[in-house]
Image (cartoon, grey):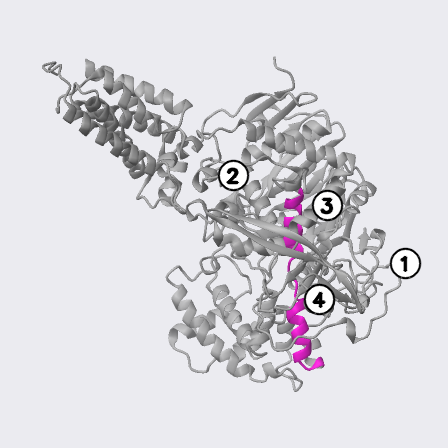
Amino acid sequence: MSEGSHQISWARVAIGLLTTLVTAAMLYFLDTPYKEVPALGRLLDPFNGFWANAEPVNGSFNQTLRFPSLKGSASLYFDERMVPHIYADNDHDIYFMEGYVHACFRLWQMDMETRAAAGRVSEVVGSKALNYDHNQRRKGMVYAAENSLKAMEAEPRTKTMLDAYTEGINTYIGQLTSRSLPLEYKLMGFKPEPWTNIKSALLMKYMADDLTGECWDIPLTYLKQSLPPAIFSLLYPEKEPGSSPVIPAGTHFDSASLSTPPVPNDSALVTFTSKDFGEAREDAKGSNNWALSGNKTQSGAAILCNDPHLGLNLPALWFEVQLHSPDMNVYGASLPGAPGVIIGFTDSISWGFTNNYRDVKDYYLIKRVAGTSDKYWMNGMQRTMTPRVERIAIKGKADFLDTVYYTVHGPVTYDERHPAAGGIRKPLAMCWMGHRGSNELLGIYLMNRAKSYAGFVDGIFHFECPAQNMVYADRQGNIALWGQGQFIDKWQGQGRFVMNGADTAALWAKKIPMRENPHVFNPAQGYVASANQSVTDSAYPYWYNGDFRELRAWRINDRLSQLQKATVKDMFDLQNDTYSILASQVLPYMLKHVPASLDSADARYISKLRKWNYQLSATSTSASLFQIWWYYLDGDIWEQLGKVPDALHPADERTMRLIATTDSEIAVIPQLKDFHRLVQQSFRKAMDSLHIASRRGREWYQVKNTSLTHLAKLAAFSYDTLKIGGWGNVVNAAKTDHGPSWRMVVQMGQEIEAYGIYPGGQSGNPGSKYYSTFIKDWAAGKYYRLLFIPFNSKPSASQTLFTWTAQPQRS
Amino acid sequence: MRFLLSVILIAALAATGEWFLPWWTFAVAAFVVSIFTRMRAGIAFLSGFIAVGGLWLGIMLWRDAANQHILSARMAALLRAASYSEIIIITALLGGLIGGLAAMSGALVSGKSKWA
């Protein structure tokens, strides 16, 4: 390095300036996101990019925390599965810490789910989510959350709960730097905004919408009109005959305190003519729960089981937690984004939920006053709608504005500017129980502290929407089941079809008192069970309809009625049961009609199918063939209903029973007259698609492809082709993207013996070893023994992996 | 000697800068240090390349080892890279390239530098 020249070479400086410019340009390019691609320099930077989210596998997670707003001190003990056992001295501190922990493990997920509820996804992903957001706004999701928030904040206990929870989340958000930001924020290029109580309310409405969203009023209205009445009631009965109802048949019901309103004349209903419907029926969200009384179990203690079937995603919907405070000791599945434990058990009682499916969402055809946009007719009088301007921010584009008009029924969800699925452009207003202000959180608050059946019932009476079948078991050996929610005293048929919004006779009338909801306590049969089937037999004095499913309930009731001296192992087996009643009933008919001449490969399949045990087990190829064959057969049969209502096929259990009539003389269903040809045709299609499927494998789990998809739909953070059997209509309801989201078995003995598992892991960070911890075991049907620390004791050192201590003062 | 000093200075300043300031401060560090070390342009490039590339490589290897490749493997799948090693190598080369260019630019604009 010679120092030869002390002269400045301007040429070199000029070149230097040029390379400086080139370097700066490169940096600018790497610091700028382009469409879906994040700013690569920021992302790849080893200091602050994704590498900062790579959690050391053997790192210590112990922390000493100082939170000035704490009232006392709090301790968190993480067990070997990273489940926090949170100890605090008062309500404020326990929910503060729960909020802090939820945010620490699942912040991005909470953010996205509440955005999804509120219709604010476009703000972070751009216009591809606009349709979705628009629909959320039209459904009145924010309006619904605002109404419930008022109710929750008017109650001192839930106000404290929400305020403290929000404070905990915001304390965590306040500590974040661009380096410690959860990975998905770095990938999507946005930052968390402060949490507010309305976000928790939104999340609860998100669940309510998820569980009461299905609504067949519109296609049923068309079908009722287009099919002969006898056929319509055969295909779409109000209730499937022979149901094993949620509340056992024969249960005594007190007579109704409200009289059933008389069925109004036809003007209360509307008719649709030829419209194009696109809604497809599927067995969506179902769930199972049951409880055995002590005289049905080997231990003599009651056993409670629950597996709610919900969307399968990563991070998982649930987060396990134990909350311990002077008046509470509860363990179970919590919902990141909402305080408390949703499904679980205390030292005294245990509870679980399945979706109740009574119809609490109805549509009204609005008759606008001609020439106006905000006036409508009601019994010959003009009324004014309340406009609500919805502003949807779209990343990289101008905001989208829409005015949603609220009628006495609810928001006009569909109209010419936002047609209903299937293309109905008439103004339809939605009347939904979820729009009403209710305080389910108080229900959670009370259940989490319940010490007896009375305490449990106290809690569930605050649970208005979504209606749930709430199963109960306690350490005294009591069991109970409630079809719980807020329901309306309806006239027969009310809300099953689209109603005339201009007729006051169609309005929702009085609320049914909670204590008159169907329930049973310690029934003679020694068990209770619900799996989304009809809620009661015909003895129940109020009329209701709903989207009920019977197949799983038949199987569960069949098994439970036979079981004696049941053990937790028997419960595991039942939750993982894959026996298909549908297959056992329809396959013999299908096999009668297979083509006489088959090539040798097809003949091999058929001979295997003849010996099949009707189990939809993971590795069965017969299960694959049956499921595909049934899919085509069902489609081919009901396709003949015509192009229009193709959408709403009769339920599988209905079709199954109708097929059983094809052998007799009474095959009155025109679509089944040609059964022989349809079976052959669908068999051909099934074999063809099985051959195509063979590239991925022909075993049932390979064909159905149960997947846990990351909420941002990133394949690299998702898991697919999980080796698990089952389907929506068998007890182990693992479908492609829905399934048992939390399996729990609790034996309420002297010592509570609890087991559980969910598909995912405690951490929502794809860079954590706790991101996917439970997935394999969940697919394999395994369970973890849950570490439940009894009241007033603490986990031992050997049970504790990490400890957090939180103090209010600065030391 | 000056070369080694330059590498150490750039690496130290880049690490400190990146910890507290935006990620691209490493380039500023390489640029500024090279104004003062007045090395030939090619040598300056090499010092910046080694300092930043080495620093980035070290941080990545350390974090990846502690993480047992959980995240790097997922990111490799996400970015359609063949493996986590590919991500690490390309990132280190990218950091080295920009660090080198910044250092060379610094050396050149100082006006005292020879070409090589």
Q: Residues within 10 Å of mark 3 (few under 14, many from 20)?
A: many
Query: In what quadrant of the picture does the C terminus of chain A appear?
Result: top right
Span of residues in magenta? A201-229
Q: Which quadrant of the structure image shows residue A786?
A: top right
A541 to the left or right of A189: right
Q: Position of residue A647 (x, y in %)?
A: 58, 70
- Do the residues under discs 2 and 4 have CB atoms within 8 angstroms? no
Q: Is residue A256 above or below residue A278?
A: above
Give the residue type at disc 1. Answer: Ser
Q: Position of residue A778 (x, y in %)?
A: 54, 46
The chain carrying label 1 is: A
Q: Element type at marker 3?
A: helix
The chain carrying label 2 is: A
First in residue order: circle 3 vs circle 4: 3
Residue under label 1, please give it: A257
Q: Main secondary structure of the magenta part?
A: helix
The chain carrying label 3 is: A
Residue under label 3, please give it: A148
